[in-house]
Amino acid sequence: MVGNVWGTKKHSALEGTKLLLVQAIETDSGNVSGDISLAVDQNFGAGPGDTVLLVDEGSSARQILGKKSAPIRLAICGIVDQVNVRGKVVKYH
């Protein structure tokens, strides 16, 4: 997660959520790659510097948030502490 987004108004279905800026990383090196995207966090309390797990599909994102009418595509569904890649442990905190 690379940053927060603040807005004076949100779609009513997004009340109680945080809007966060995220960017993909390469699993084994931790290097950032790709464009920055906007994700919604409702339950996980992610913050700048956290490595997060995302769901990148609108219907699934709305199901995770329990908000059928929310205008979202990308949602945070977990905070990652470490990953095992080909026997190598990569820690993210």
Image: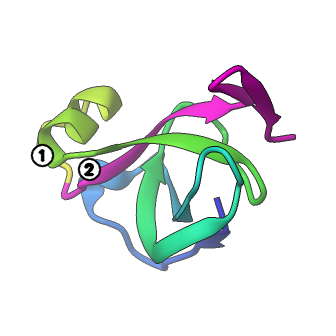
Around disc 1, counting alpha carbons within 10 Å, would you say few (fewer than 14), some (14 to 19), or many (20 or more)?
Answer: few
Q: Is residue 49 left or right of residue 44?
A: right
Q: Where does residue 38 sit, x and y in percent of width and height? A: 42, 67
The kind of secondary structure the magenta stretch mainly shows is: strand
Residue 30 vertical position relative to residue 9 in the rendered view, above or below: above
User: Residue at the spot x=68%, y=64% of the render?
Assistant: 31
Res 52 → quadrant: top right
In the rendered structure, the answer to whether residue 45 lies left or right of residue 35 reads right
Taking depth in this image into account, of 4 and 9 the one nearest to the observer is 4
The location of residue 92, given as percent across then percent down, is: 80, 41
The image quadrant where one finds the N terminus is bottom right
Q: The disc labelled 1 sits on which kind of residue?
A: Ser
For image coordinates 24% across by 55% down, the residue present is 72
- Toward the front, the furthest residue is 86
In the displayed structure, would residue 23 be above or below residue 63? below
Residue position marked by numbered label 2 in the rendering: 13
- Residue 47: which numbered mark, if any? none
Q: Is residue 85 magenta?
A: yes
Q: CA distance from mark 1 to mark 2?
A: 6 Å
Residue 26 position (above or below residue 32): above
Q: Which residues are magenta?
A: 71-93
12 drawn magenta: no
Find disc 1 in the rendering and name its residue: 69
Tag 1 near tag 2, CB within 8 Å? yes
Q: Which secondary structure lies at badge 1?
A: loop
